[in-house]
Every structure is written in C-alpha cells, then in structure tokens.
Amino acid sequence: MAQPLHQQYMARAVQLARQGLYSTHPNPRVGCVIVKDGQIIGEGFHKKAGEGHAEVQALASLTTDAKGATAYVTLEPCSHHGRTPPCAEALVKAGVATVVYGMQDPNPQVAGNGLKILSDAGIDVIGPVLENECRALNPGFIKRMEEGLPYVRVKMAMSVDGRTAMESGESQWITGPAARQDVQRLRAQSSAIVTGIGSVIMDNPSMTVRIDENDQEADTKTVRQPLRVILDTALSIPPEAKILYPTNEVLVFCDEEEIEPEHLQALEKKKVDVRFLPLAEDGRLDLVEAMGQLADDGINEVLVETGAVLAGAFLDAGLVDELVIYMAPKLLGSEARPLLSLPLQNMSDALELNLLDMAKVGNDIKLVYQPLYREDEDE
C-alpha cells in the first residue's frame, strides 16, 4: 500500500480520536480505522475510561471479517491488562495482516511491547505515520508519562492595552459571549482546573463546565466535570464558596503549619480533599510538587484560571506549556490591573513566546503562545 494512503487513513484515525477530546480522561485519545481491499470496513475511537479502546470499537463495527486487513491506530496498541484486555492481542485474534501506528505509547507499561506482540505474531508493523498529528492529540498524557507532570495551560483575558481588570478588581466581562463559551470548551478538555484563593474570594467562581446545548463542537452528553483545585496556603476558603459545590470533585492544597483544625474538619466533612504541600523558596506553596501530585492522580491536562500573581508564579516556575490569551477590543487604561505579576528588571530577562495559534472568536482575538524558557532556547 502506498505511503500517501497510509497518511490518508491515519488522518481519518486522528479525526476519530478527536471525538474523545472531552471524555477519555485519564486515558489518551485514540482513533482506529480498519481497511481491507481498499475499503474502510471498521472504525472507532476511545470514548471513555473503562469502555473499549479504539481498536476494540473498530473491530466491533466491522462490516466483514478483518482477516488480512490493515489497521491504522493513532497510538501503539496496548499490551497490558487494565480495565480492558490488551488491544494488541485483539488485533492478532482478528487476523489483521498489517498494523500502521501513529506513535509509540509513552506509557512504560506499553512502550514498544504492543508492537512486539504484533511482530511476534507475524503481523507487519509500520510506523510512525503522522506522528506529530498523533502526538498533538494527547499532550497531557504524553507529558505525564514522560515527565511526571501534567500539560499546563494558563488562560487569561485582557484588553488591547494588556489589562485584566479595573483597579477596583472589576473584571466582568472583558470578553464577549463567544470567547466565554470557548473557555468552557477549554475547561471541558481539561482534567483539572486550578485557581488561587485570591480569585475565589474576589470573584466567587464555580469553575464548572457550562457548555451551551447548541454548541456544535462539544457534545454536552460526553462532557465531564474536571477536578477543581484551589491553592490556599492558610486554608481560608469560605465554606459557602461556590467552587466547593458539588464537593466530591474539589481538591485544596494548603500549608499544614497555617491551618485551623476546625476549618479543616469542616471541609473534610464536606468530602473536600485537603492536602498539605511544602512551601517553595519564595514562601508560597510548591507549585511543582502540586503538579506532580496531580500527575500521580492521573491528571493529564490542567487549565489555570487565576489572577496575575499566581499566573506569574506558574510561569516563573517553568510549568506553563501554553498561554491562552483572549484579547478584547477595549482599553481599560493605565490604572487597571496588569496581565501578569512577573517582575523582570532587564530586557535580557524577557520571556520569549512562540505563537502557536491565533483566531478571531466573536469580536475577540484568541492567542495561544508557548513560553520559550531558557532551557528551550539553549537546545
């Protein structure tokens, strides 16, 4: 089969995988296409943890038997027993002759073992094909497996003059309805939303996903509510704060030395997960440790929605993979609050950004940047 056809069918598998954008946590998004005699005879994608993987869904949809067929899968078929049996064995049992894969699985439990099972069974294994596109499906899963950290996006809204709120703190609404709905989609694809106690007290947000039922991009039936994480050093969060309801998906990080036991007990009675974190050198909660714990919990993608100080702290810690900035066609003036608290002294200290994407969202502009930390520039 010619290489362009491999790319064509893999592109379809990538398209299928994207249908699991909002629902596969903590698993990766994977798509599979099965081709025989130049025709697609089965296809599927992973929908939800605990349900059949993409290969299983594709095999279940077959219009004829798969003996001698070619399977295209965006991620190396799994080789271990989890909630579901190994997909590599399912493909062997189905009698496929060739497997074309998009990328090797970064999960140490797989990491080439799935490909070996296929090869040992006499199946022709080809790949990687469209590796960049396949990696782009799962930035959080890949980073968690390779670095032990989640993929972190920091979302901010600003005026054209780089301000996020008036001097009084008034900020609703800088952006328009289309941009705000786009943020809901960002929340929906995230495993967790992180904010600081300052934002909780100032704005009293709920931080839940609220997808418009008429949204063409996100099916409200597949959207899950991400974990809500509050960084609260002194554990001062008001018990009536909106973000605490419902309480079964809330995690609060705090410093054990500063808490009041009665407040802790009240939160634990609400089934809020309260964890103690060490302090970093700057006296704040250790953000690297917090992100490491989230990764250990299976959190792939984190959306940080917070104020200038905490957003700056995430950048300063080198934890930000993407800056997502919505720029509204407004001027808030020189007395309004800045986008970030990032006290740099010299031009040589400036943090360079790589523009990944730019789009018009309603009357606002969405800018997606990758911070280029010093170690990135030196590579």
Image: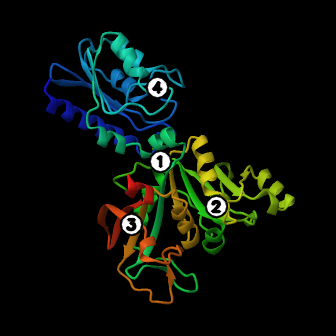
Q: Residue at x 46, y 25 (%)?
A: 110
Of pointers 1 and 4, the one earlier in the residue sequence:
4
Q: How far across and how far down the image is residue 321, in percent?
A: 45, 55
Alpha-carbon span between mark 2 and mark 4: 37 Å
Element under disc 2: helix
Is 351 in front, or is 94? 351
Does 14 appear above or below 330?
above
Element under disc 3: strand
- According to the picture, the residue beneath numbered tag 1 turns out to be 223
Q: Residue at x 51, y 43 (%)?
A: 147
Amino acid carrying label 4: it is Val
- According to the picture, the residue beneath numbered tag 2 turns out to be 243
Query: On the rendered structure, is 62 left or right of 177?
Result: left
- According to the picture, the residue beneath numbered tag 4 turns out to be 110
Label ID, residue 352: 3
* Tag 4 and tag 3, C-beta contact below 8 Å: no
Alpha-carbon span between mark 4 and mark 3: 36 Å
Amino acid carrying label 1: it is Val
* Quadrant position of the N terminus in the picture: top left
Amino acid carrying label 3: it is Glu
